Image (cartoon, grey):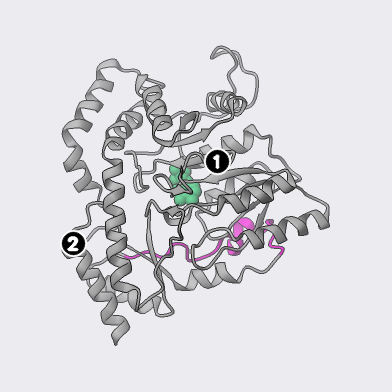
């Protein structure tokens, strides 16, 4: 059994994808070819964001957004330790200090109360300038953006929504892409909308920021390619990846429906055995992962593994325990993030998971919990 089944998806889309790749081979505009602009406009239609800037990865999307705001040493960037490393890594790369804030146990996302306390504490300590909050839409579920925005407004902070797992999700009627001052996403192959290599996007309604990020994406270019007005990076998306993503976007809503169906089936079958993911009213998850919690996590994982069912612990070591973040600040204790690392388990969820496969997974988990 596969954790993410890209082979079956390719079988479904093969004719379309091969034709799209052939068109790129015909025009040979491998860098910034016409498909890049086409994808950006399709993603604006999809999310209703005013601007989409496609780029080289979710990590670079985070980096370029922080660069556009001029994040630098002496700035505090608030985020969760219960996420993929890139979320916090790019702030540290720019010399800012990462301040880790605890998450809410029932939805795995940044806890607005813990965030409020940490911002106050950083202000009291007085040596750092609170600058950016990076909420993460972990496992596909948007964070509580209204509560976060209220704190951002109160303390004059920017909100950079890490929607790398959240693309396809919604919060109070808004698509991931419209959340925060900037939303970023990733097109890594295993994400909800995945390419056949690296890719990402930045979404924003802010015209000035759009212009800055487009410039940073190509070496800080000015009006023309060889006029350079600021420090930038090689942050472009590959034309092939854009062409492939255009094909995948056509079936994306169908795939989201399939993910939702599978999640509903898991929740109904497992709710009396393990802690199932909670999706409160007003939220729609993109179901990048289906993550259960149990004190018997290791037994479940081993039993699944024995029967050839892949299950993964995201994330076994919270970021504040990672060596690379020795310089980051943990002002308040992070008990929830630590507990989650010991109890979470992500089980297969992808649009092509067969009913028989899912029944088998459910059966195996119940076997453990009944023993
Ligand atoms: C995948 C991911 C990223 C990084 O995306 P890449 O495209 O792999 O660089 C950042 N944040 C989160 C939460 C992710 O899951």
- Which comes before the other along the chain, label 1 or label 2? 1
**Rendered position, 349 above or below 72:** below
Quarter placement of the N terminus = bottom left
| Magenta-drawn stretch contains 318 | yes
Query: In the image, 16: left or right of 65?
Result: left
Image quarter for residue 80?
bottom right
Q: Where does residue 101 sit, x and y in percent of width and height?
A: 63, 60
Q: List the single residue furthest toward the bottom.
A: 371
Residue at 22%, 45% in the rendered image: 9
| Magenta-drawn stretch contains 234 | no
Q: Which residue is mark 2?
A: 355
The answer to whether residue 65 of the structure is visible from this angle is yes
SS type, badge 1: helix
**Rendered position, 33 above or below 294:** above
Query: In the image, 126: left or right of 217?
Result: right
Query: In the image, 346: left or right of 324?
Result: left
Q: Main secondary structure of the magenta part?
A: loop
Q: Which residue is mark 1?
A: 62
- Which span of residues is magenta-colored? 311-331
Q: Where does residue 5 sit, x and y in percent of width and height?
A: 25, 51
- The reply to whether the residue tagged 1 has its Cβ within 8 angstroms of ligand 1 is yes
**Alpha-carbon neighbours of circle 1 within 10 Å: few (<14), some, or many (≥20)?**
many
Q: Where does residue 117 sit, x and y in percent of width and height?
A: 72, 61
Q: Where does residue 360 sit, x and y in percent of width and height?
A: 20, 70
Residue at 37%, 55% in the rendered image: 287
């Amino acid at each position: 059994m596969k954790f993410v089944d890209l082979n079956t998806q390719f079988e479904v889309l093969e004719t379309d994808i091969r034709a799209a790749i052939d068109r790129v081979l015909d025009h040979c505009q491998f860098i910034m070819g016409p498909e890049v602009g086409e994808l950006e406009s399709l993603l604006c239609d999809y999310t209703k964001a005013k601007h989409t800037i496609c780029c080289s990865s979710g990590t670079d999307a985070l980096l370029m957004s922080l660069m556009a705001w001029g994040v630098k040493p002496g700035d505090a960037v608030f985020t969760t330790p219960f996420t993929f490393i890139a979320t916090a890594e790019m702030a540290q790369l720019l010399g800012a200090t990462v301040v880790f804030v605890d998450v809410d146990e029932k939805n795995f996302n940044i806890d607005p109360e813990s965030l409020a306390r940490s911002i106050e504490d950083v202000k009291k300590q007085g040596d750092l300038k609170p600058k950016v909050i990076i909420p993460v839409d972990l496992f596909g579920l948007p964070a509580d953006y209204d509560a976060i925005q209220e704190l951002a407004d109160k303390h004059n902070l920017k909100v950079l929504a890490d929607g790398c797992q959240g693309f396809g999700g919604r919060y109070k009627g808004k698509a991931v892409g419209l959340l925060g001052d900037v939303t970023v996403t990733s097109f890594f192959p295993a994400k909800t909308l995945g390419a056949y290599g690296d890719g990402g996007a930045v979404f924003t309604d802010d015209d000035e920021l759009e212009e800055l990020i487009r410039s940073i994406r190509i070496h800080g270019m000015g009006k023309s390619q060889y006029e350079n007005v600021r420090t930038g990076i090689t942050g472009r998306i590959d034309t092939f990846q854009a062409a492939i993503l255009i094909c995948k976007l056509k079936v994306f809503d169908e795939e989201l429906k399939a993910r939702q169906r599978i999640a509903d089936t898991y929740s109904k079958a497992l709710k009396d055995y393990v802690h199932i993911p909670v999706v409160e009213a007003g939220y729609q998850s993109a179901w990048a992962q289906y993550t259960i919690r149990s004190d018997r996590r290791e037994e479940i994982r081993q039993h699944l593994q024995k029967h050839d069912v892949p299950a993964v612990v995201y994330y076994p070591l919270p970021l504040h325990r990672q060596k690379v973040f020795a310089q980051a600040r943990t002002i308040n204790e992070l008990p929830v993030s630590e507990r989650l690392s010991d109890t979470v388990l992500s089980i297969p969820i992808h649009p092509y998971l067969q009913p028989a496969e899912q029944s088998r997974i459910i059966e195996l988990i119940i076997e453990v919990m009944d023993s």
